[in-house]
Amino acid sequence: MTKLLDGHVAVVTGGGSGIGEAIALGYAEQGASVAVVDVNEAAGADTAKAITDAGGKAISVGVDVTDRAGCNAAAEKISAALGEVSILVNNAGINRRTPFSGDKAEVAKDWDDILEVNLKGVFNVTHAFLDQLRATKGRVINIGSIQSFVHVRWPNSAAYTTSKHGVLGMTRALAAELGKDGVRVNAIGPGLIETPLNKAARDGNPDMVQKVLEHTPLGRAGKPSDIVGPAIFLASDLASYVTGGIVMADGGFRSI
Ligand SMILES: NC(=O)c1ccc[n+]([C@@H]2O[C@H](COP(=O)([O-])OP(=O)(O)OC[C@H]3O[C@@H](n4cnc5c(N)ncnc54)[C@H](O)[C@@H]3O)[C@@H](O)[C@H]2O)c1
């Protein structure tokens, strides 16, 4: 039976955990060969093994997306192992919930670290795969957030909101610039998704979780699996005339 991503080679950054892991597994189920890229090599290797154990094709590559030379080397390594990449999911991300008026050295460090990973990381990886994506008329999916539009006042940081606004801006800019090459660039805006990224924040702030859920028409937090369908859609030919957009997968949070 034909699958939606047969013949595609996909790279998923941050594929060792949470949303990225779910997308990597979902892409493999739809027929794509998958390169799992993660700074946590062991976690990435576990995801790749889960794919190959299920009969799919995958490799894992330990890369820090803030390391530009490392991203370039990974692009060569992945194309040699799996073929030219046609789907790139820029998912790797971090968050630290530092108040802007808090300890100056801590705020400055978190600002640098968050923008390095969440925003410059998207540049580094996309730039590293640019030639392959143009050659394959590829698809880029960036993981944004509700915070691509607003600042969510559960403990959070200005740096994270700024980075996710930037991700949406980069999505639109690259869609405009690369459309002539047949490369589509879109984003997904997850709401509150239960992953290791926010476990401590959820556990430490049950009242805030309740407030978020009260503002969420679907009335529940999301699971990583809730992001897989939009990610497959945007990577597949079903989305052949979709570029420069953001698909919100937030239980309706942003609509009210
Ligand atoms: N969980 C949510 O509620 C939520 C909501 C909106 C957006 N997001 C975004 O979704 C993405 C995935 O988040 P998650 O919740 O699955 O987090 P997670 O912590 O479960 O997974 C993130 C993965 O990225 C990897 N990573 C971190 N820094 C890296 C680096 N420098 N280089 C390579 N890999 C790196 C980690 O090792 C980890 O495997 C992030 O961009 C996050 O901002 C998450």
Image: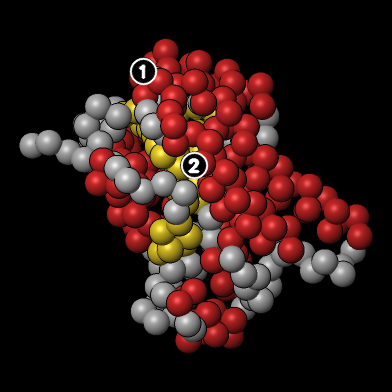
User: Does residue 98 appear to the left or right of 212 in the view shown?
Assistant: right
* Cα distance in 3D space between marks 2 and 1: 23 Å
Mark 2: which secondary structure?
helix
Looking at the image, which residue is at 25% across and 36% down? 5
User: Does residue 3 appear to the left or right of 83 in the view shown?
Assistant: left
Which of the two residues, 68 or 162, is positioned nearer the viewer here?
162
Mark 1: which secondary structure?
loop
Marks 2 and 1, the one that precedes in the sequence: 1
Residue 218 visible in rendering: yes
Q: How crowded is mark 1: few (under 14 residues within 10 Å), some or many (20 or more)?
A: some
Residue 53 visible in rendering: no
Res 184 quadrant in image: top left
Q: Which residue lies furthest to the top in this view?
A: 80
Q: Where is residue 103 in the image (x, y as percent from the top left)?
A: 90, 63
Question: Amino acid under label 2?
Answer: Ala
Q: Residue furthest right?
A: 104
Q: Is residue 156 above or below residue 87?
A: below
Which of the two residues, 162 or 44, is positioned nearer the viewer here?
162
Q: Position of residue 22 (x, y in %)?
A: 37, 49
- Closer to the eye: label 2 or 1: 2
Q: What numbered label is drawn on residue 175? A: 2
Q: How crowded is mark 2: few (under 14 residues within 10 Å), some or many (20 or more)?
A: many
Looking at the image, which residue is at 55% across and 33% down? 126
User: How many numbered circles does the render carry?
Assistant: 2
Q: What numbered label is drawn on residue 83? A: 1
Label 2–label 1 contact, CB within 8 A = no
Quarter of the figure with the N terminus: top left
Question: Amino acid under label 1?
Answer: Gly
Res 220 quadrant in image: bottom left
Q: Position of residue 190 (x, y in %)?
A: 47, 62
